[in-house]
Image (cartoon, rainbow, N blue to C red):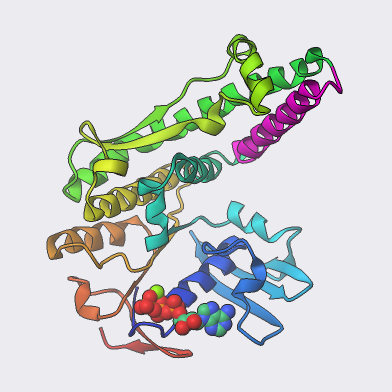
Amino acid sequence: MLLVGPNGVGKTNLLEGVHVATQGFSPRTRTDSQVVRFGADGARAAVAGGRGDVRMELEVTVQRGEGKRARLNGAPLRAAEQLRTVVSTLVFTPDRLGVVKGPPASRRAYFDRVLGRLAPARATLPAEYGAAVAQRNAALRRAAGGFSGRDAIEPWSERVALLGAELVAARLDALDQLGPSFGARAAELGLDHASLRYEGEPPTQEALAAVLDRDLERGITSLGPHLDDVVLAAGDRDLRNYGSQGEQRLALLALLLAEAETIVDRTGVPPLLLLDDVLSELDPERRRILAARVRSAGQALVTATDAAMLPATPDQLLEVTSGTVLEAAA
Ligand SMILES: Nc1ncnc2c1ncn2[C@@H]1O[C@H](COP(=O)(O)OP(=O)(O)OP(=O)(O)O)[C@@H](O)[C@H]1O
Ligand SMILES: [Mg+2]
């Protein structure tokens, strides 16, 4: 589905609304009140559709000062974020290029969300590990300040080692699942020999003991997967530093398409793809390849300022003007 309209009419807003309705949160901000229209008290986003053969209605409302509520087929959910376990929505926005060109923290956050989508049972692991590191750091500071002995750090080191090893294993597992499709989709888009490589080792208790003096001095845990990285490479080129803008965009798209394929393999249900401003900066041949691939990847909503930017006929063409969306003849 192609959504066209001039700058500033609300195409991105529309995709954001679909994301809120299907996932329970905005891809742009963690502050729910930011999705409410200026001057309004609340916002409501609702979508109806099918997941395989099952009909579904999803609805999310955000009320200023009251928080967020979600319903699935009319029944209230405990938390809006539960929608994530019902529908997978994958987003491309130009902001997301930070996954390729940003600091390691952006890739860790991205791949930890990927691992949550691919292995829902492990979705809470990154947060549990983060909490263990925070506890160990607090214990380090207490010991350094003389408020407790060094042995009080030990249980937290154990927990960091245990959860850290699990997190590294889960991330490696997610990368193993994505790697082959990532390489294939990137090659198809003209980015050869693309790969995902994990940089980091599972932390062990011995390794943590070896850095204890340094950690006590600094009050932070200086090794573990909270400091690891995932290198997106083309051949032996790290795309973070040596990729062109277009190549970085292709890598992010290949990543998204690879995840979509992996989700279909695992669940049999294709995800919803929201591709905002994806066509700009790609040459016509790559746009054509992308359009063909997206068509087979699941339902996709693609925005552009001009219908001619998509060198293919969309199944549905929608014209966005300020405040309204109209079906246009494709
Ligand atoms: N909470 C809000 N309430 C009302 N208007 C808002 C809110 N947040 C953003 N806007 C406005 O919505 C307008 C449309 O923004 P949007 O980013 O969706 O446009 P767009 O069609 O994607 O444009 P472009 O082609 O430039 O990407 C902007 O002018 C912005 O100021
Ligand atoms: Mg926009």
Q: Main secondary structure of the magenta part?
A: helix
Placement of the C terminus among the 4 image quadrants: bottom left
Residue 92 visible? The answer is no
Residue 144: % across, % down: 76, 22
Placement of the N terminus among the 4 image quadrants: bottom left
Q: Is residue 70 above or below residue 317?
A: above
**Point 35% across, 45% down: residue:** 258
**Point 65% across, 14% down: residue:** 213
Q: Is 100 placed left or right of 135 in the picture?
A: left
Task: Please state the extent of the stretch shown in magenta in the rendering.
Answer: 122-148
Q: Residue furthest right?
A: 147
Q: Is residue 33 above or below residue 248?
A: below
Q: Is 189 placed left or right of 149 in the picture?
A: left
Residue 265 visible? The answer is yes
Residue 225: % across, % down: 54, 29
Q: Is 15 placed left or right of 128 in the picture?
A: left
* In the image, residue 209 lies in the stretch drawn in magenta: no
